[in-house]
Every structure is written in C-alpha cells, then in structure tokens.
Image (cartoon, rainbow, N blue to C red):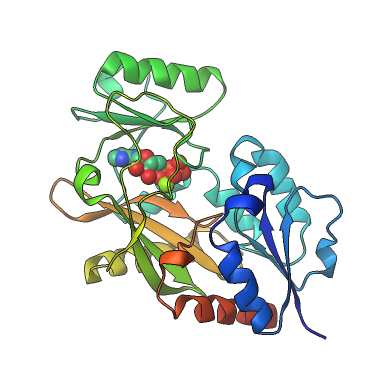
Amino acid sequence: MSSRVALVSSERGLRVDPDLPLAAPALREAGFAVDCVRWDDPAVDWSGCDLAVVRSCWDYAWRRAEFLAWADAVPRLRNDAAVLRWNTDKTHLRDVAAAGLPVVPTVWDPAGTADLPDAEEWVVKPSVSAGARDTARWTDTGDVLAHVAQLTAAGRTAMVQPYQASVDDAGETALLFLGGRFSHAARKPPMLGRGEGVRQDRSGRRGVRPAPATPEQRDLAQAVVDAAAVLVPGAAPLLYARIDLVADAAGRPVVLEVELTEPNLFLPHAPAEALPRLVRAVGDAIAA
Ligand SMILES: Nc1ncnc2c1ncn2[C@@H]1O[C@H](COP(=O)(O)OP(=O)(O)O)[C@@H](O)[C@H]1O
Ligand SMILES: [Mg+2]
C-alpha cells in the first residue's frame, strides 16, 4: 500500500499556495497517496497519515496556541512540534545570535528612545507574525515607540531593528534546504515601503526571482540549519528550512529570518532538481 502524505495548509493556503500544485503531483507520481488539507479541518485522520508536512498554515500567527496544540497531537509531523514551538516566535533569533551567528541587530520591547538601536530608520514587528503583518518601517522615533506601545498593549513582544538599507536594492536572499541540505535560492524584493506605515495586504511572493547564493551565504545558512538542530532539543531532522539573509552595512550576510514552520519553498522558481529533492526528503522522513 502506498504511504499517505498530508500536505498541510490553511483555508487561504489551499487556494493560493503556489508550491502545492507542484509538490502534490510530484509526490503522487512517486507513488505517495497525497491529500492537501487544512490543519484545522476536524475531519482529517492524522493518525492515518504516514507523514503530515506543514506547508501553508499561514493563519497560525493569530492562532498560535491552537496551532501548537494541534501540532502536539499529530503523530508524524514535519517539521515537528518542537521545531514549530521554537520557530513560531521570533524570540528564537536570540538563541541563533547566542550561538554566535550574525543576526540583524534586534532590541526587544524598548521602553524609550535610549533603548533604540542606532539607526536612521527602524523596522518594528511583533515576534509572532508572518507575511509582514503588523510590521512597518519608520524614520521617526515617536512612530517607532507608538508602534511598539501598540504591540505591547496587545500582549505581544515587539522587535525593533535598524532598517537594512541593502534590502531596497538587493532585497533578501532566501536559501532553501530540503532534507537538511541546500537546494536552491531565490531573491525576494523589499516588502516595506518608506512612509507606508502598517499594512496588512502585502504579498511577499510578487517579484520573487531565482538567484544564486554566494558561498558565504550558503555557509551561514547551513550553519543556521545546523544550529537549529542543537537549539531545539529532541527535534526530528528538519524536512525543510528557509533561511532569509540580508546584507549588513559592510555587505556581509546576516540572518533576517529562520523559517522552519511554513516557508514558501518558491518551487515555481526553483531548478528542476528541487522537486525530486523534496520527494526524496519526504520518503526519507517516512522511512526514518
Ligand atoms: N530589519 C529589516 N530591514 C529591512 N527590511 C526588513 C527588516 N525586517 C523586516 N524587513 C522587511 O519586512 C519583511 C517581513 O519581515 P520578516 O522579519 O521577514 O518577518 P515575516 O516574513 O515573518 O513577516 C521582510 O521580508 C523584509 O522585506
Ligand atoms: Mg519574512
């Protein structure tokens, strides 16, 4: 009997996730029985899946506790619940920095101007978020602190970072790992417009292009993937990972985001080898 694989999405993800229409047929062709399902669909029999693969569960950001409780209850989940618990709150970037890896400088819940990182422009974001929701860039410290106050009043942790000017020209480089190994890279355009304030309707996928990754970028991203395995005790090997890097003022790569939960894999922009790699990684995870 063929192994059952659930590709786990959300109401919106099932409609617009660009990876599912490529991943599902590739897995079926390889002999897996594949269902694309919502994580919050009570009709799904998770114990009947040989592997449930978290993909476009984009609504976890405002339902995190419910999402993690669901993850705890799914027997064979990748990435697994321990990884999701660690990764769905960007406070994990402290662990990554503490492991000696370069991360965009971040101040957490600043109380006043004196706490802000030295910069001419800042980004404010909540520690639990996806798709640049509740995220904005500001040139005025009053706006920065007002945004922080709004997030903390809602019980959220606020992050303030210097706006990395390189993003405006070079964008972000997203490095995709499948089965723990580098697969491909893509360039993401800037998401935050100056003076735009907080917007909820940004689409991160517009303007994504395949891009080469430099050896320096690959080494850093691999080091982050390797560190994650140590930073999350008891975690199952990562089925997928996306490490988003930007260049700092000196042009060196630094980590902007570690996406081990529901990274868009940019499969429509990936080289032909990416799909077979994904299929192999799924097979290996089932066999493990
Ligand atoms: N410090 C920063 N400098 C420049 N751009 C940033 C910075 N932080 C976030 N951004 C922009 O905001 C987007 C969303 O932020 P990110 O940290 O990736 O969180 P998420 O993707 O989970 O919403 C990024 O893709 C990037 O375009
Ligand atoms: Mg991001």
Determine the residue positioned at 45% across, 69% down.
177
Relative to 91, is 22 above or below? below
Query: Is any atom of residue 285 visible in this view?
Result: no
Quadrant where the C terminus lies? bottom right
Relative to 60, is 62 above or below? above
Query: Is any atom of residue 66 visible in this view?
Result: yes
Closest to the observer: 61 or 104? 61
Closest to the observer: 266 or 117? 266
Closest to the observer: 262 or 206? 206
Quadrant where the N terminus lies? bottom right
Question: In the shown orientation, is residue 152 left or right of residue 14?
Answer: left
Residue 98 appears at what percent x and percent y? 37, 51
Closest to the observer: 15 or 182? 15
Relative to 117, is 46 above or below? below
Determine the residue positioned at 25% across, 18% down.
140
Residue 268 appears at what percent x and percent y? 46, 65
Determine the residue positioned at 64% across, 46% down.
12
Residue 244 appears in which quarter of the rendering? bottom left
Question: In the shown orientation, is residue 61 left or right of residue 165?
Answer: right
